[in-house]
Amino acid sequence: MTRDKELAEEIRIAHRIQMSTLPAFLPDVAGYDFFGKFWPADETGGDTFDLVSVADDTVFLLLADATGHGIGPALSALQVQSMLRVALRLGASLEDAFRHVNAQMAEDLPEGHFVTAFFGLLNTATSEVDYLAAGQGPILHFREHGEIFDWFDPACPPMGFMEHVQPPDSQTLKLERGDLLALISDGIFEYENEHGEFFGMDRVEEIIRSGRGAPMDDLAKLIVAAAREFGAAAVQRDDITIVLIRRMPAPGHDRHTDAE
Amino acid sequence: MFEIDTDAQGIVRIAGRLSSASCEQARRFLEATGVPRVIDCTDLRFLSSAGLGVLLVVQKRLTDSGDTLTLRHVSAEIREVLRHTGLDGIFDVEGG
């Protein structure tokens, strides 16, 4: 096998390994619709996500994005995912998990590199999400009552660029019936067309407003398809990851099915 | 398109797209000219995470001497990028 073919095979193996670290099955919890998927720009990418039960009534949520895309950032993203998952399974607070993972990444990453991450724990009994957004934004909490798009930015810088960063206290949001928590990587918001325009938050809002009654799997595909249509001939420059968590409305109350 | 140079007052100016494609050019320039305390961002149109990394390296150097990097004439779009990445509190950001 020539060296080029060996490299191509190694990259394919790296791709398979990266894909295998993503959740094979999403949590099956009554009253919730979960979705998570990663579309790398190359064979491997710097995004990752997690959606996994870590305890009774507790689902770990994660969207992370390491600087760049390719094998190096893929390893960084995997490292952050693994460390956070283990830390939270062991019962660490979100703040302690951030401090230790940040310190480790500051030691391991090349200078100027970092990893953004929104991570948290959804209590499926109370519908509360305790979270910490470290450089990962914008995050969307869509509130069904009043059709309010509550976009918020991280209160904390990303992980890994500086060893000693004191995180803010973690925050809590409550998912009421019909609400949607959308973790969307910048690969969607910054999807660029040939005129140098970006897909942006407004277009994401339009799609969610009209399509939120659809299964989250379909809604995510609508978002990606719309970004690709917007970009037309432009190649996907950045990794795309979407994590959607919807608390289902009461039976008979979901009238927003424009996307179906 | 990306440009990095110094103006007549010696202020570093970055223009165009600071992304993974232009990072190396920016790094080489800053290594050759020294650590700036101010960067003029008047004509900066796009800033990727790799580009942020270049600015963070500058900030790290300045942190050692107790200084903060000032980003001057930052557009609303670039300010939004800084907010979305939680880095707006790391730099001293002055509006465009």
Image (cartoon, rainbow, N blue to C red):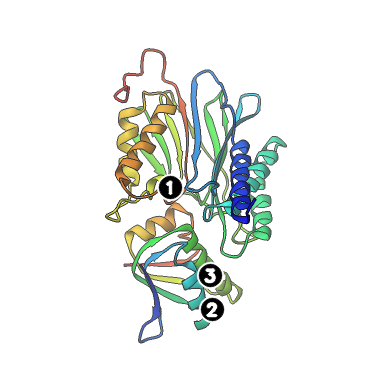
The numbered dot on residue A128 is: none
**In the image: residue B63, left or right of residue A230:** right
* Residue type, numbered disc 1: Gly
Cα distance in 3D space between marks 2 and 3: 14 Å
Which residue is the extreme one toward the top? A252
The numbered dot on residue A187 is: 1
Please provide percent x and percent y for residue B58: 53, 72
The numbered dot on residue B59 is: 3
Which residue is the extreme one toward the right? A90
Residue at left offset 42%, top offset 39%: A140
Residue at left offset 53%, top offset 70%: B59
Q: Chain of mark 1?
A: A
Residues marked 2 and 3 touching at CB (< 8 Å): no
Is residue A108 shown above or below A178? below
Which residue is the extreme one toward the bottom? B8
Q: Quadrant of the C terminus of chain A?
A: top left
Q: Chain of mark 2?
A: B
Cα distance in 3D space between marks 2 and 1: 30 Å
Is residue B5 visible to us here?
Answer: yes
Q: Are marks 2 and 1 on the same chain?
A: no
* Residue type, numbered disc 3: Gln
Which residue is the extreme one toward the front? A1
Instruction: Look at the numbered disc 1 and give the secondary structure of its residue.
Output: helix
Instruction: Look at the numbered disc 3 and give the secondary structure of its residue.
Output: helix
User: According to the image, label 2 marks what residue?
Assistant: B31
Cα distance in 3D space between marks 1 and 3: 26 Å
Please provide percent x and percent y for residue A21: 63, 38
Is residue B53 shown above or below A99? below
Is residue A14 shown above or below A57? below
